[in-house]
Image (spheres, helix red, strand yellow):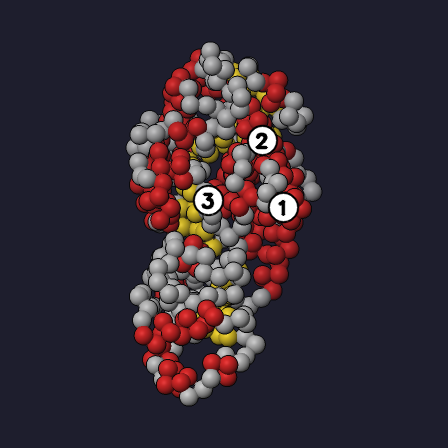
Amino acid sequence: VTAAPPFAVFKGWEEQKSAQTVFACDVLIDAILGSGFRPPVSGVYAEAIAKINAYTAPVIAVDIPSGADADVMGEQTGAVARADAIVTFTVPRPAHIFGNLTIGPTIVAPIGSPDAVIQSSLNLNVITPKDIAPLIAPRPRDSNKGMYGHVLVIGGSVGKAGAAAMAGFSALRAGAGLVTVATPTSVLPTVAGFHPELMTEPLAKTDAGSISLQALKALERVAEKKTVLAIGPGISRHEETAELVRTIVLHSEIPIVLDADGLNAFEGQAKDLNRRVRGERTGTAEKNAILVLTPHPGEMSRLAGLLTAAIQRDRINVALSFAKEHGVILVLKGDRTIVADPSGEAWVNPTGNPGMATGGTGDILTGIVAGMIAQNPDRAFEAVLAAVYLHGLAGDIASESVGEHSLVGTDLVRSLPEAFERVRVDAAQESLRVGGRNHGILS
């Protein structure tokens, strides 16, 4: 439904009134063109949008700012009304999430739409505290560390020891019962000295100081009885190390989180990922075949063989297509990180800020994802959603004290305990509100 037809009388009416009279209000509600509109804007609507954009008081858009294309994931073309806030209904559209349509919040309000109507559109969801709170519920009094999983981080190399250490400690902060970092002897003292709670395992090294293929047998032994593997932080692009990564990913029967140069090991060989998931080499059960990939757009470009610009223009569909084709859980990092699964569902993360564009934050996400899966191996996809939300929220909390320009990766680790608590509080408040599916505030 749109207010456009009745608004056609605006021009003649406005000519009889001064602009001062027409816009003499404290707040302007823009309900001219809705999400069903497709550009370009012309005639009286273009004139109205120009007047809205010249208006100095707050503007609240109903559904979507007039002139915007609801399905555009990037920059809008043509005339679009400015908005200080947006109130949309039932589920957000891509432009609400990626379009930078407002300087304020986008509020998604439930109106009782049936699930069939919701599912008929793009299967896009927004992660909310209520979605993930069950995964961070209070622990029973008789808890022991064995109940919360054992993460094995495989990574580190000369010059990149910190990446493996940050991933390991982040997994602990996320709640994993135990974390071991398997790393080459060249950097083991650095990793071991990062935090006393981390256990370490020395591995054979290449001449370049990365993990050697000769470490494979040792890794097979170390990986026994581990809950989840986190492969890639600081591991390097050395070809011998890349071969080791490919061998582990394709043969291991343990859930894996693959990041950084672990992803780059599959550049031009993404189809091999299917062989693990389908069990052609391992005969594993579906649960054990879980593979989570966490690329940033550059790594995604190398994996998918697409230009980075093309990925950024169509982030949701690129993520969904890759997840479905290769049977993986895909976390496409960036502004409004996308989490896609093979069933065709995509979730958008509303947390995070530009200050997180700094070295180490990706390694910390890898650790949080692994830590959450370690505690929830039967709910891996939900664990990934929780990890992504908490990671961004920790970044938001950190920026409150250090600002965006000065934020560093370890600030997120320090802020993670408060992020957990905020999720619990926000989820409780959300439960008190009467609402429908996936409503909330996007920004």
Q: Position of residue 132 (x, y in %)?
A: 54, 50
What type is the residue that disc 2 sits on? Met
Q: Is residue 443 left or right of residue 192?
A: left
Q: Position of residue 432 (x, y in %)?
A: 60, 64
Residue 111, above or below 156: below
Label 3: which residue?
A: 334
Label 1: which residue?
A: 403
Give the CA separation, mark 3 to mark 1: 19 Å
Residue 228, above or below 208: below
Which disc is residue 166 wearing? 2
Q: Quadrant of residue 277?
A: top left
What type is the residue that disc 3 sits on? Gly
Which disc is residue 52 wearing? none
Residue drawn at 39 percent across, 55 percent down: 75
What type is the residue that disc 1 sits on? Gly
- Looking at the image, do the residues carrying marks 3 and 1 touch, with CB atoms under 8 Å apart? no
Badge nearest the viewer, 3 or 1: 1
Q: Position of residue 17 (x, y in %)?
A: 45, 86
